[in-house]
Amino acid sequence: MRLGRLAKASLATPRLVLAAAREVRQADRSGTLVASAYQLVGAVAALGVVVTGKLTFDALLTPERAALGLTPSLLLLALTTALSGAVSPLQTQQHRILGERVSQRVWDRLLDTTARADLVTYESTGFATALERVQQNALTRPFAVTTALLGLTGSLLGVGAMSAVLLTVEPLLLPLLLAAGVPAVLLSRWASRTEFAFAHRLTALFRRRDYLRQLLTRRPYAAEVRAFDATPRLRERHERMNVEVNAALRAQVRRRQLVAALTTLGVAAALTAALLAIVQLVQSGRIGLAEAGAAAIAVRMLSGQLGTLFSSIGGLLESAPFLADLERFVTSGPPAAPRGRKRPLAAGVALRGVRFGYPGQARYAVDGVDIEIRAGEVVALVGENGSGKTTLAKIVAGLYEPDTGTRHWDGVALPAPDVRASVTVIFQDFVRYQMSLRDNITISDDGGSAELAEEAARAAGLLRAVGRLPDGMDTVLGRDLDEGVDISGGQWQRVALARALYRDTPLIVLDEPAAALDPRAEHELFTNVRATLGGRAALLISHRFSSTRMADRIYVMADGRVVECGTHDELMAAAGQYAELYRLQSAAYR
């Protein structure tokens, strides 16, 4: 199967090379023209070195027949040699700019693809592995492809110019040099296949090793790793993975070194044969010393141009499978969904007979659930871990689409983008953006209204904390990227709540909103929760039954199903699972 994919990628190489050329041109049209101009100047300068070299030899060996004197010939030779040498660093710097622009364009395509992927796809292992493989391999190729394409252009011009010179001196010299190209291209094709197979095989290992490195270096993990003295064991695992990587890498490097050695030997053999042929031609009287000198210069420069040509072809062949992998990834995603439109909530949200299963899982995570959230209500979801509460909340928020059943908004089955635009979700593992407090709150709004941000901070109980920050709302939070200010987990929880309030949707999903709050803060939040919500409906997920007592209606979930529904008093009177769990939890306080 893998060999078949590699064969298809090899057959598609010309198409991929043309696609890469279009990417380069579209990324920076003017930069591509400048780079191409440098390649043309380099080829002309190389031809000028050969021509002025011939003039110099003529002036030295046969001055009576020379077109120019020795001094003008030497000056022209020095000028063309200097120009030929000066073009290379100019090309290198231009390639840096062009490579960065191409990289940006490819990243934009990748980000477009990840943005289009629905949450189920994004959370799947296959998607994550493919994304990691593309990030580690395909995204490092744009600069190589850019350099290879420009090198290919320049070397083709140079080969053409030098070939024209050799054809005028002795046509038999050209086939000797070009013969080295056939094995070089074949070897490059083989090397490209082994390189892609190597990267494909080691992607999962690289992912595991990178995760260990994050555990050992990232600040969020530092306290627990040290508290459990886990560093030695993590380092041992990391070292074992390094050994595995090194073994695979050594084998791949030996293969690439063999290819490089065989290619170099082929070019060297062709160059030697051509130079010996020049000597033989001089001895036989077919060419003079001046022609021989010019031919020797042309052969040497043509050999260099052929080396660049073969190297560029090899680079393109090596990059082709990775470009194919990138192309498959960016075209495999769904088309971009239309931007959702925020809808008011007049009656409520109702789910009927909803079922949802994760790919590869035998049973439904949510199985035949009916719930209702009326406008302005606070509805709670409770149940043991794994009962399906968070999955159901994601269905309510339009992040997951049910496999069967219906989700109606004011009696209408809205498209998922409209549902997502009309619901705000704060998960238990909410994101702590390493940005300013204001940006943390206004992350959903490009406008970033200062007044609304401060109002959301006030409603979430953040004003006291804001007053202690050195730059107020503009204080950078977290220390991962900048020297910002770290705040407590409870304050971060309030920041997340302010973020939800700022978005101002008619329905808010709160997944364990008091998990990091102290008892006083939790009491303050839920005592005034309706005032805090400002008339919005809310779906509250919590393991703390003290937080759910105030809900208008409580749904109890078990094994993906709703097993009980009612107010706190009704459920306690029913003496079912809710009452059992409530008594178990409250007993801890007696």
Image (cartoon, grey):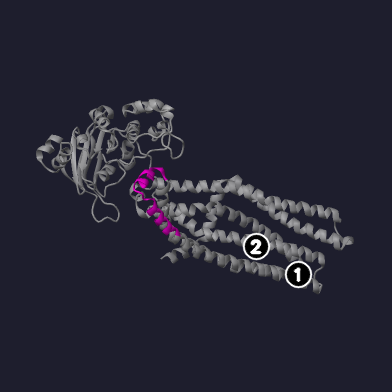
User: Seen in the image, is 353 located left or right of residue 437?
Assistant: left
In the image, what residue occupies the spot 60% across and 67% down? 261
In the image, what residue occupies the spot 34% across and 41% down? 417
Residue 100, x across and y down, in percent: 55, 47
Residue 333 seen: yes
Q: Residue furthest right?
A: 64
Label 1 sits on residue: 278
Q: Which is more toward the observer, 264 or 91?
A: 264
Q: What amino acid is found at the position of numbered circle 1 in the picture?
A: Ile
Label 2 sits on residue: 306
- Vertical placement of 114 versus 513: above or below? below
Residue 37 seen: no
Count of numbered circles on the image: 2
- The magenta segment is 218-242
Which quadrant would residue 567 be assigned to in this image?
top left
Which quadrant would residue 540 be assigned to in this image?
top left
Residue 237, x across and y down, in percent: 39, 56
For the N terminus, the quadrant is bottom left
User: Seen in the image, is 152 located left or right of residue 391?
Assistant: right
Q: 10 Å neighbourhood of mark 2: few (<14), some, or many (≥20)?
A: many
Q: Secondary structure at mark 1?
A: helix
Tell me, for residue 17, which label it has, or none.
none
Residue 265, x across and y down, in percent: 63, 68
- Vertical placement of 203 versus 349: above or below? below
Q: 10 Å neighbourhood of mark 1: few (<14), some, or many (≥20)?
A: many
